[in-house]
Image (cartoon, helix red, strand yellow):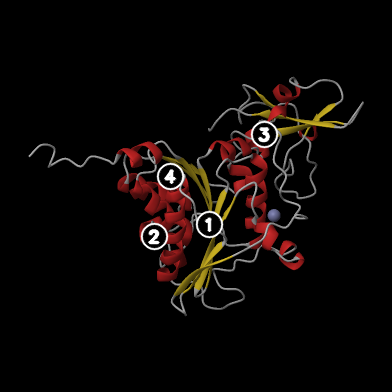
Amino acid sequence: MKGATRLVPLPRVEKHLAAATVVVVGVGGLGTEVARLLAQAGVGRMILCDPDTVEASNLSRGALFLPAHVGLPKVDAAAQVLRELAPGMEVEVRADDFRYGVGLGELRAADLVLSCLDSIADRIALSSRCIFSGSPRGLLDAGLHPWGGEVRHYSSDGSCYVCGCSPVDRSMPAWHVACGFPPVLGAPAPVVTLVASWQAMFAVRLLFDEPLPEGIVTVDAAAGLSRPVLQDRAEDCPCHEVIDHRYIATTDLTVDSTVEEVLALTTAGERVQSWNPVDRQDALSPLHLDAAGPQRRLRELGIPPAEFLPVLRARPSQHVRYLALRGAL
Ligand SMILES: [Zn+2]
């Protein structure tokens, strides 16, 4: 029988998923499970970003973590298993906070960005950064609570994570809700898998350019229900600005370039900024690159690959343009 013994990928899957780059920010319970599902679905390239190492307590909820991984960076442990599960998939790892690990250029170039973070402050920061980058499909965010969670898709013309935040939420420190806040039961593995499955399914639909239900899908394990909840776009939300691509200049700079090489691309009166303090150890450190020595490399200053560095000019009129670093590491 012709072709009966060979598995042939569906042309649609091959085209949309094998060619897709997905960024997964947060590689804990949700992140590992959604990464596993998308790897097995046939995604071609994945960037994993998380600053933490695997602890024994993560083993009960991390779909890709094994006892031998305790002490390893989460991204390395997850990548190791993903490469076994899906040898055709390219996996890149960033063992860092996403503000330092994934540049705006990568968020913009990705086919989809998945937020699998567990603090309000981080979810706000990633949502804002992703929308600002001009990411074409926006952000697919998911979060957990002890007996459920929610999945939300944010695009540049709809509502964003911050639209739904109260002023109190917006000023919250980095509470880790899913891990039990304050010390209550964290989401058990079946709840993690349930919410991650919704997130992965929506990711596949977005990569196929298929529509999603409107609003936030909430998963209530206690009631046995999943249902959409509408969220309006808040017109006064401070996080809807999108970068003006006309002012992005491509360069040959990389994270291994020096401050001096960056400054050589500017003109008199311009100042190159960073999005985060130049000295990572000091939150009050300046946000302009010339505060660092001319021979310092961008990597040492926490500038991520493919970042867009803002260049400000105050006179004769206020203006901002962006220097785009080249691709990944
Ligand atoms: Zn908003």
Image coordinates for residue 19, horizontal then vertical, percent: 41, 36
Q: Earlier in the sequence, mark 1 or mark 3?
A: 1
Give the residue pinned by disc 3. Answer: 308
Which three-letter amino acid code belongs to the residue tagged 2? Ala
User: In whole angstroms, how far apart are the C-alphas of marks 4 and 1?
Assistant: 21 Å
Query: In the drawing, does residue 278 fall left or right of residue 65?
Result: right
In terms of sequence position, does the residue under pointer 3 or pointer 4 come before the other? 4
Q: Secondary structure beneath disc 4?
A: loop
Q: From this view, report whether residue 319 is shown above or below residue 55.
A: above
Q: Earlier in the sequence, mark 4 or mark 1?
A: 1
Q: Residues within 10 Å of mark 2 (few under 14, many from 20)?
A: many
Residue where numbered disc 2 is placed: 63
The residue beneath circle 1 is 116
* Residue placed most toward the observer, 46 or 201: 201
* Residue type pointed to by label 1: Cys
The amino acid beneath tag 4 is: Phe
Tell me where residue 73 appears, x and y as whole percent. Answer: 48, 51
Q: Could you say which is closer to the camera, residue 269 or residue 156?
A: 156
